[in-house]
Every structure is written in C-alpha cells, then in structure tokens.
Image: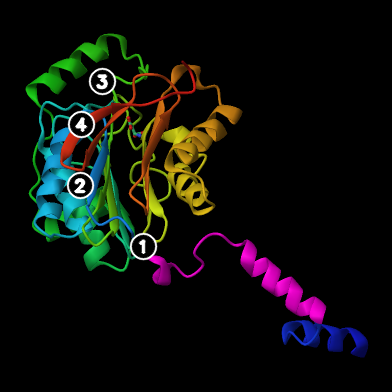
C-alpha cells in the first residue's frame, strides 16, 4: 500500500476527514435492525402469548399458557405445550401414535430454542415419547445442539427417559394397510404429516419455541425433515421474533425457512409479510403444486402473522384471554 493510501485509510478509520465521518455515520443510520441482540431484548408487549400450528395447537397453547400465566418462562411453556401434543395418541403426526416410516418404525424429530439463542435438537429418535424434552436436555446438559438416532436414544436413556413402543393399534393397522400398495404420497394438509411448531412469549416479553413431529408418514427410513433443524423448522431471536414451520420439510430445509422469516422481520417486515415472502421463495424455485408449507411468526411487539402455499392451514393463538383457531391466507387461492 502506498504511503498516500495508507494515510487516507487511516483518516477514514479514525474519522479524521469529512468524507470518512459522513460515510460511517450514514451507514449506521441505515441499519434499522438491532445490531447488538443483547441490548434490544426489551419488548413493549408484556401480556404473554402462545401460538402454534394446526388444531392440536389449542391444547398445546393451553398447557403453555398455564406456565406463562403463573409467571413461568417461555422455554418451560414451549416444552410443556409441545409435550401435550406428543403424548396425544390420537394425533398421527407427532410423538406416540405418530405414523411410522416405510419400515414400520416411528422416528421422531424435535427441537427447542430459548431467548438466549441456545438450542437443542434430536432427530431420527425411536422409542421415546417426548423428543422435545430430550432436545431440552441436549440444550441444557450437553455442549452440543443436535443428537441423532442411536446416540440420541442412548442419551435419552441415560437421562432417565423410558423406551416404549410408539406404534398404537391404529397406526399398526394403518401401516399394514399401507403395505398393500406401499405408495408414498404426501397429501396436502392432512393426516400423513402435521407437525406442531409452538412459539411462546412470556410476561417479560421473552421468546422461546419448540417444534416436534413424527415427520412425513411412510418416509424413507432415516429421513430427517426440517423440524429438528434450527433455522428450518424453528428459529428464535429474542431481539426480533420467532417463526416455525410445518409442511414438506425438504422445501423448508432448502430455503432455511424460519431463519429467513426472522431475518425478514429484522429488516422491518411484518410477521405476515415475512411469512409470505418465505413462501414465495419456495414457490419461485420449486413446483409447489403437490405440497403444503405453512409458516407462523411473531415479532417483538407481539404481532403475529402466517402464510401458506395452499388453503387449509390454520393456527391456534392464545392471546388477550382467548385461545382460538385462525385461518391462514395462501398463495394458491
Ligand atoms: N415438516 C414436517 C416434516 O417434513 C412435517 C409436517 O410439518 O407436516 O417432517
């Protein structure tokens, strides 16, 4: 570098000339998002809320609300809410009673994320009814984020989780019937998939989230979807907001779906517009005729939004004393 240029650079870095000062001050002003997350975690919204995907979200929200309304924190609320859906044997897309893969095995994916950006996740976990709680232990008690398969099971057992048969009489019978054709055919919105993604905000205005699923029914053995992947099935940034996803996990994975939604909110988009843009990114590149994606999101002000590819997606929102289902606008009308 020449002496002249070195001096010029030095002047810019120390703000020693007008041009230098103008450039740096101008650039700073343009940033509308919080640069230092730790300094921007105070929310104007202090009422607390729980929002989750699909109808099973009503019961999950109730459990989460039980924690929040008694002064508990968002992470406990997210875990407790997700556990309700995992334990529901009638739900064929989450936890016990979840639809198996094409080998007849129920393999579960789940993750959890807190206000500090800590995260835990398990995937391809078999024989454990509450993968979300194993994910919580991965977050709280290991230096890792994600454990899979046998290692996840070993860890769960070491932590005292009991191994049990997750097939029910009904899912076993369904599987037998499925073997007649062995046709893999994801149906939009219904039955062979429907994850619960749950976002909670406590009365300090802090966020957490959880996402748990048995994944696509009759998927390939070993297949992992978006739900246990941080930034795909779930993302929380306490300075900005949180988002979670449901639908064909492959499409969400390829677009880092929920990370994208949160980043778009960081740039100033409403939760609704951010979900819409994230859906559009999928639609731009992929043939979306035969699969569904649904996003839900919340920002720091407590505003919620959602968007899906096809009609039929809905979410449960516990806010202002009501726990109700909301229909979602979609790209395809
Ligand atoms: N996203 C889940 C998966 O791909 C399924 C779903 O949400 O319906 O495993």
Which numbered dot is residue 292?
none
Q: How many marks?
A: 4
Residue range of the region highlighted in magenta in the rendering: 18-41
In front: label 1 or label 4: 4
Mark pair 3, 2: CA separation? 20 Å
Does the CB distance between marks 4 and 3 fall below 8 Å? no
Label 3 neighbourhood size at 10 Å, few (<14), some (14-19), many (20+)? Answer: some
Which numbered dot is residue 191?
3
Mark pair 1, 4: CA separation? 29 Å
Q: Under tag 1, what secondary structure?
A: loop
Label 2 neighbourhood size at 10 Å, few (<14), some (14-19), many (20+)? Answer: many
Residue 169 x %, y %: 7, 22
Mark pair 4, 3: CA separation? 21 Å
The image quarter in which residue 309 lies: top left
Q: Under tag 4, what secondary structure?
A: strand
Residue receiving disc 4: 324
In the image, residue 285 above or below residue 320: above
The residue at 49%/32% (across/down) is 279
Does the CB distance between marks 4 and 2 fall below 8 Å? no
Which color mode does the image show?
rainbow
Residue 205 x %, y %: 28, 59
Q: Nearer the viewer, residue 39 or 133?
A: 39
Residue 72 x %, y %: 13, 59
Residue receiving disc 1: 117
Quarter of the picture holding the N terminus:
bottom right
In front: label 1 or label 2: 1
The residue at 23%/47% (across/down) is 49
Does the CB distance between marks 3 and 2 fall below 8 Å? no
Mark closer to the chain start, 4 or 2: 2
Residue receiving disc 2: 131
In front: label 4 or label 3: 4
């Amino acid at each position: 570098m020449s002496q002249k240029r070195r001096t010029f650079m030095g002047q810019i870095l120390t703000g020693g000339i007008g041009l230098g000062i103008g450039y740096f001050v101008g650039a700073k002003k343009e940033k509308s998002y919080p640069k230092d997350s730790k300094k921007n975690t105070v929310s104007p919204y202090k009422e607390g809320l729980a929002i989750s995907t699909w109808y099973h979200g009503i019961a999950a929200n109730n459990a989460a609300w039980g924690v929040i309304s008694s002064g508990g924190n968002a992470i406990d609320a997210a875990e407790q809410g997700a556990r309700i859906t995992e334990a529901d044997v009638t739900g064929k897309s989450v936890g016990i009673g979840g639809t198996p893969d094409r080998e007849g095995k129920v393999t579960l994916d789940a993750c959890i994320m807190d206000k500090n950006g800590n995260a835990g996740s398990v995937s391809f976990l078999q024989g454990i009814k509450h993968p979300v709680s194993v994910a919580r232990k991965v977050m709280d008690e290991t230096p890792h984020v994600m454990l899979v398969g046998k290692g996840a099971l070993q860890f769960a057992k070491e932590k005292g989780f009991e191994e049990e048969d997750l097939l029910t009489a009904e899912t076993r019978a369904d599987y037998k019937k499925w073997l007649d054709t062995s046709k893999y055919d994801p149906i939009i919105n219904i039955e062979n998939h429907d994850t619960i993604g749950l976002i909670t905000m406590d009365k300090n205005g802090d966020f957490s989230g959880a996402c748990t699923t048995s994944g696509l029914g009759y998927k390939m053995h070993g297949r992992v979807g978006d739900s246990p992947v941080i930034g795909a099935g779930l993302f929380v940034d306490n300075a900005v907001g949180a988002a979670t996803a449901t639908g064909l996990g492959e499409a969400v994975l390829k677009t880092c779906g929920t990370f994208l939604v949160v980043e778009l909110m960081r740039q100033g988009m409403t939760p609704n517009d951010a979900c819409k843009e994230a859906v559009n990114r999928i639609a731009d590149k992929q043939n979306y005729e035969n699969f569904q994606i649904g996003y839900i999101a919340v920002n720091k002000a407590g505003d919620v939004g959602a968007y899906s590819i096809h009609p039929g997606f809905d979410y449960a929102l516990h806010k202002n004393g009501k726990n109700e289902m909301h229909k979602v606008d979609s790209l395809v009308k």
